[in-house]
Image (spheres, rainbow, N blue to C red):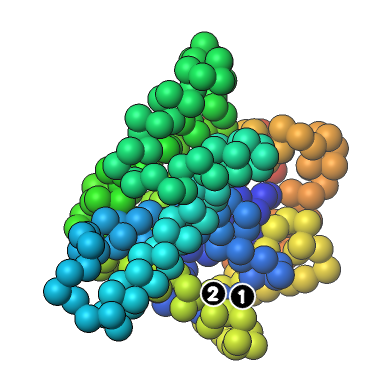
Amino acid sequence: MSRTNRLLDVLEIALQQEGIPYFRDSDDDFWSLKEPRALLTMLTGIMEGGKALALPVGNGRGRNLLGQTALERRLAHSRTQLLAGCRAGLYLCGWKASVTEGLLKQLEPLPLSEWKAFVEGWIKETGREDVKKKTRKLSSGVHFLEYLPGWCTVSLQDPVLLIEGLRRWNAGLLPSVSETCAIALGSIARLRGTLSQRLQFIDRLAQKKQESAPVLGPETVYLTTMHGSKGLEWEKVWILGVEDGVVPHLDGELEEERRLFYVAMTRARRRLVLSAVREGNPSPFLAECGIEAE
């Protein structure tokens, strides 16, 4: 149990990867949220861009018509996926759809290797050069397009290097987006295999959750927020994030936060565990309860 869904997102991913049965009393899991979905689309586009770069080039002499047609279809598919990934990446940067579509329309016919130079010229022509230094949204979007060819190149060879590059780029996004994407990238980094295998694993997790009804056995971890716990009881309850700024939450009224914490603690019949990060300050509610932080 936790005060916010953000903490449950981290725990849900950990349970998924360890194969521990759980049930979350929300219609949406972490990977169905807008930012993680966009990140997965972006990664798929980067991977397909890498496949496009790996396809043989030339005028097709020496190849039969059937093979040439299949090659052209494969390239067209990869380019379509790449553009979808670009839209997702620029969405995470906070770009308006009209600006994104206008730029991608100009980039679409160009080889990926020429994108960086074109974007640099586009910045100068549109008078956005000074704005780039001041606006995080514009700066992160331009960096995304500049780094994209390199990311596509390494995507099929070294997913670890790719994820590290994405983490650095992600640090420049708006905090509300960057925090969620950091959780997603951390989860993908902990998986093994190629980028394709990691994305397939996440996709299978999502499909499995949609297709199977929840089985609430004795070993199932029940994930819920403090608000969602009202009226429910369990033998054992573990409350995450019992630290100042989370409990009580900065956005809540003190008395309501105090009542909410009391409700959360009284959901346990036999055992209650309260935890917080070492770097944070313990919740002042702990002192009110006569509990000393270890």
Quadrant of residue 245 in the image? Answer: top right
Front-most of residues 175 and 268:
175
Q: Amino acid at mark 1?
A: Phe
Q: CA distance from mark 1 to mark 2?
A: 13 Å
Of all residues shown, which one is farthest toward the top? 130
Q: Is residue 140 above or below residue 109?
A: above
Which disc is residue 31 wearing? none
Residue at 34% in and 76% down: 69
Q: Which residue is mark 2?
A: 206
Across and down, in percent, residue 117 comes to 35, 30
Front-most of residues 148 and 121:
121
Across and down, in percent, residue 7 comes to 57, 51
Front-most of residues 60 and 182:
60
Q: Which residue is mark 1?
A: 23
Q: Secondary structure at mark 2?
A: helix
Query: How many neighbours does mark 2 have within 10 angstroms: few (below 14), some (14-19), or many (20 or more)?
Result: some
Across and down, in percent, residue 189 comes to 33, 55
Query: How many neighbours does mark 1 have within 10 angstroms: few (below 14), some (14-19), or many (20 or more)?
Result: some
| Pointer 1 or 2: first along the chain | 1
Front-most of residues 221 and 153:
153
| Image-based side of 154 in relation to 264, left or right | left
Would residue 185 be seen by someone viewing this image from the given angle?
Answer: yes
Across and down, in percent, residue 46 comes to 38, 54
Residue at 79% in and 49% down: 260
